[in-house]
Image (cartoon, rainbow, N blue to C red):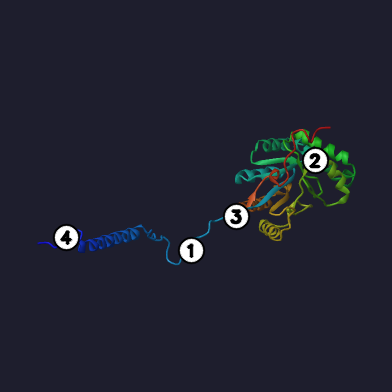
Amino acid sequence: METQSDEGGPTGFVFYKPLLLLLVLMACAKTTRRNDINNITQPQPSTAKTGEKTPPPTRKKKKKKIYLTFDDGPNKGTRKVLDIVQQEQVPVTFFLIGEHAFASTSQRATWDSLRIEESIELCNHSHTHAWHNRYNKFYEQPDSVVNDFKRCQDSLGLSNTISRTPGRNIWRVDTLRYTDLSKSAAAADSLQQAGFTIIGWDLEWHYDHKNFTLKNGADALLGQIDSLFAANKTRVPEHLVLLAHDQVYDDANDSAELHQLIKKLKARDEYELLVTSKFPGAKPRKEGSATAD
């Protein structure tokens, strides 16, 4: 017969009640701890090899800009320069003399070929080349200088106002101003006021003026280009304008040197060839601004 408690219930139940409560609490605690462990985010295995660092993102290196320019055409060497440019498909600029385009049948034919070639740019080098090389007299009369350039602009129907002064290394590009001989400054200022952008040069490919042959080859010139960039001695940093005279390349050996230079420049990843209208600040004016009276 079961023993009764003071409250009238069985004494066995009174003894086991705290024990059952303790067991329930212990079971709940174990379940909670197991769930916490399962919820911990486990580290994911690395795909990189031990000791390797993630390389930083590569940044595209900015290229140095080179502007190949050829003066005094159309003449005997212009056709050979154009043939090389077409073979290599590179952008170059021809600074043309107005009266040369119509001086002979062959020059007119060359002019027609220049006009239809899309990879090149045609710019103004005056109509008479400073009254046929009479430089001092020419630049003494600013109004006559402006009229000579306007005549070239009109006769060739040029689509831009970028120009180069014959026999003078002058720059009037936006705020860039440089005049090699101060006596020519007034004429240069007049040209700029008339709407012309004047491009000079940073490096000239020199030739013998007696026999029209180069004084140095492609490798030597490429070394000069590298040195000018390295020393930061161009008119605008990271931009180099090269002056050449296309009558020199009528000679087979000299045209071969030109071809080699262009091939080597194309192969150099740090260089990019452009036409002169891409030069900083050389934005052509509105059509007609350089021809208006």
**Residue at 66 percent of width and 51 percent of height:** 65
Q: CA distance from mark 2 to mark 4?
A: 126 Å
Q: Which residue is mark 1?
A: 53
Q: CA distance from mark 2 to mark 3?
A: 38 Å
Does the residue at mark 2 contact the one at mark 1 (Cβ under 8 Å)? no
Disc with the residue nearer the chain's start (1 vs 4): 4
Image position, residue 220 (x, y; %): 68, 59
The residue closer to the viewer here, 41 or 152, is 41
Of the residues shown, which amino acid type is indicated by label 1? Lys
Q: Is residue 72 left or right of residue 255?
A: right
Does the residue at mark 3 contact the one at mark 1 (Cβ under 8 Å)? no
Disc with the residue nearer the chain's start (2 vs 1): 1
- Could you say which disc has been placed on residue 10 in the image? 4
**Residue at 20 percent of width and 59 percent of height:** 7
SS category of the residue bearing label 2: loop
Q: Which residue is mark 2?
A: 126
Of the residues shown, which amino acid type is indicated by label 3? Lys
Of the residues shown, which amino acid type is indicated by label 2? Ser
Of the residues shown, which amino acid type is indicated by label 4? Pro
Q: Nearer the viewer, mark 3 or mark 1?
A: 1
Image position, residue 17 (x, y; %): 22, 61
For the C terminus, which image quadrant?
top right
Q: CA distance from mark 3 to mark 1?
A: 23 Å
Does the residue at mark 2 contact the one at mark 4 (Cβ under 8 Å)? no
Q: Which residue is mark 3?
A: 61
**Residue at 83 percent of width and 40 percent of height:** 193
Packing grade of label 1 (10 A; few <14, some 14-19, many >=20) is few
Image position, residue 94 (x, y; %): 71, 43
Res. 34 visible in picture: yes
Residue sitting at the far left: 1
